[in-house]
Amino acid sequence: MSRASKLTLFGTSCMAAAIVVGVHYSQRVEKAAMHAGVVRDIEQQRVKKERQADFEMQKALEEEYKKIQQVHDTVPPVADSAGVGGNVV
């Protein structure tokens, strides 16, 4: 084999090996990113369930307190101490 053909074979072999290594590295990085997304989704679901449980607990407490206490939905109007049309200074 000539020197040029040996160099060509060596160069193409190195390029092929570099491409294979690069593709494997790229796949590993993508897999790690996808796994991080799954972990993030699981954490978001956990937080959502925790908040929903807290909301349900607060709602149950509110219902319990409403049974115990007199709760009015509207606030009665406050009477004006100066009378009708009077100016308070």
Image: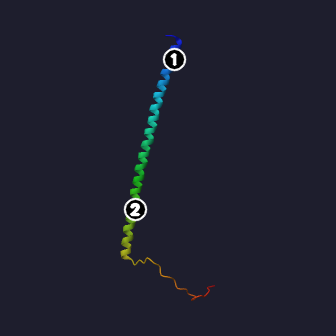
Residue 75 falls left or right of residue 88:
left
What is the x, y in percent for residue 72?
Answer: 42, 78
Q: Position of residue 24 (x, y in %)?
A: 44, 32
Does residue 65 lie above or below 84 as drawn?
Answer: above
* Amino acid type, mark 1: Thr
Classify 10 Å Cα crowding around label 1: few (below 14), some (14-19), many (20 and above).
few
Residue at x 38%, y 74% (from the top left corner) = 66
The CA span between labels 1 and 2 is: 69 Å
Q: Is residue 85 left or right of residue 33?
A: right
Question: What residue is at 41 percent from the left and 59 percent from the top?
Answer: 51
By what rule are the colours in the image chosen? Answer: rainbow
Q: Position of residue 29 (x, y in %)?
A: 46, 37
Q: Position of residue 60 (x, y in %)?
A: 36, 68
Q: Which residue is mark 2?
A: 54
Q: Residue at x 38, y 67 (%)?
A: 59
Q: Which of the two discs, 1 and 2, sits closer to the camera?
A: 1
SS under mark 1 = helix
Answer above or below: position of 47 versus 61.
Answer: above
**Alpha-carbon neighbours of circle 2 within 10 Å: few (<14), some, or many (≥20)?**
few
Mark 1 or 2, nearer chain start: 1
- Tell me: residue 34, above or below residue 45: above
Q: Amino acid at mark 2?
A: Asp
Residue at the spot of label 1: 8
- Considering the numbered disc 2 on the image, is that residue within a helix, a strand or a loop? helix
Query: Which residue extends farthest top?
Result: 1
Q: Residue at x 38, y 73 (%)?
A: 65
